Amino acid sequence: MLDVLAHRVYRHLFFAQVIALIGTGLTTVALALLAHDLAGEQAGVVLGTALAIKMVAYVGIAPLVGAYASRLPRRTLLVSLDLLRAAVVCSLPFVTDVWQIYVLIFLLNACSAGFTPVFQATIPDILEDEEQYTRALSLSRLAYDLENLLSPMVAAALLMVMSFDVLFLLNALAFVISASLVISVILPESQSLQEIPGVWRRVSHGIRIYLKTPRLRGLLALNLAVSAAGAMQIVNTVVLVRSMLGLGEKEVALAFAAAGGGSMLVALMLPKILNQVTERPIMLLGGVMMSLSLFLGWLGPSFAGLVGLWLLLGAGASLVMTPTGRLLKRSCQPEDRPALFAAQFSLSHSCWLVTYPLAGWLGVNLGLAGTFALLGTLALSATGLAMLVWPRRDPIEIAHEHPPISHSHLHYHDEHHQHEHEGWEGPEPHRHSHHHSRGSHRHVLVIDDHHAHWPSQHKLR
């Protein structure tokens, strides 16, 4: 897996991601402790609301950035957003009221909503080989798991010698280092052949591709399962450990680390597994594992039992999230990647927007045992829905019929555009009105200008 780090550009981006996520992990622990200091036993509600505001920023900002990211230089955009995030995090130590947490969380994550999809869409342009890209996805999953594993462990050690306020400043430093690594490499330009008219059509372009693709509708259902399990773990861990079990800050950090440990173990094994097995059964298994961990939590585990459940939950989440990039890459044209990755970012976080406040509200009003049971039911139902909407037979190349169509868009004279010109339309790619006759053929099928709808099963040949 580490062979992919021989690619210099990817290596710099990977370490930029690792460092930024370690810093973000410090802020996750510090934010939980800040909420507990300000609100006591109501910390779950405060943290759930803050994280819901984070999701509002993600859901609202990501499609806007995805629509226009191809017009902006990638490196400049990524570096600017890293520096803005550093400035916002520096303000968190000075918070004295709960509403200030909410404002700063929105600003911080508005920047992240721009940064993350552009960063993710850049990787397949750097690593075009499928095996290398799969390894990169596993490494990326490991980097995210460092936020749940290494960062809390570092936080636990740092909290022995300093207050949690200092963790926010260390996160700001991490963002500055991340920006310096990004600026040290040349990134490929976005491929943008299509100018989509209208702001709404441009903003919703990636979401339309996403919702019209069966495998991605299944992915969206699994995203809901991930958010149900993850919200329980993130929102209520501090309440479980401190208020229910009566333990301290170090145990909170270790409990957060357990989910990251389970996820890392799976991410290390997945590249070889994905060479033998398709994504669908692996990701559905992940949904079942997360559901099981929540149902077992209803039994009221000890601290050791909670660590075991979070390990299982993290492993299941990794089975779902690690292969996601492969599905997105397979489901769109290269020029549509920024829009589709932004759609995944926005739609998946729409699920978190529901489950974060739900986990906090249920924990306070229903009790933690009931919250485990209800969120487990939600995760299992979402997994069942994914099994239904994602066809068992999901070939990459599909034989299908094309209706006759006339339209105008930027194009090359490839196999789909063999037509005569009436005059001089300029060098390729160029735009002019042209006609496609009715026909049928087999190729890799994605939703684009020539495939406005996924063919129904009776039209597949």
Image (cartoon, rainbow, N blue to C red):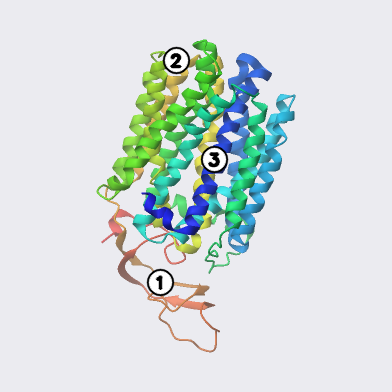
Q: Is residue 69 above or below residue 17?
A: below
Give the secondary structure at mark 2: helix
- In the picture, which quadrant includes the C terminus? bottom left
Provide residue 74's location: percent of width, then percent of height.
Answer: 59, 59
Question: What residue appears at the point 54 percent right and 38 percent down from the top-left corner?
Answer: 22
Question: What residue appears at the point 57 percent right and 27 percent down from the top-left corner?
Answer: 29
Q: Nearer the viewer, mark 2 or mark 1?
A: 2
Q: Nearer the viewer, mark 3 or mark 1?
A: 3
Provide residue 128's location: percent of width, then percent of height.
Answer: 41, 61
- Can residue 213 be seen in this snapshot? no
Looking at the image, which residue sits at the far bottom?
423
Give the secondary structure at mark 3: helix
For the residue carrying disc 1, how many other residues have a C-alpha within 10 Å: few (<14), some (14-19), or many (20+)? Answer: few
Depth check: give the residue in front, 93 or 221.
93
Between marks 3 and 2, how big is the CA–CA gap? 31 Å
Looking at the image, which residue sits at the far front?
161
Q: Which residue is mark 3?
A: 21
Provide residue 221's location: percent of width, then percent of height.
Answer: 42, 39
Q: Left of 278 or right of it: where is 167?
A: right
Between marks 2 and 1, how big is the CA–CA gap? 58 Å
For the residue marked with disc 2, what is the amino acid?
A: Ala
Q: Which mark is residue 404?
A: 1
For the residue carrying disc 3, how many other residues have a C-alpha within 10 Å: few (<14), some (14-19), or many (20+)? Answer: many
- Can residue 461 be seen in this snapshot? yes
Q: Which residue is mark 2?
A: 369
Provide residue 16's location: percent of width, then percent of height.
Answer: 55, 48
For the residue marked with disc 1, what is the amino acid?
A: Pro
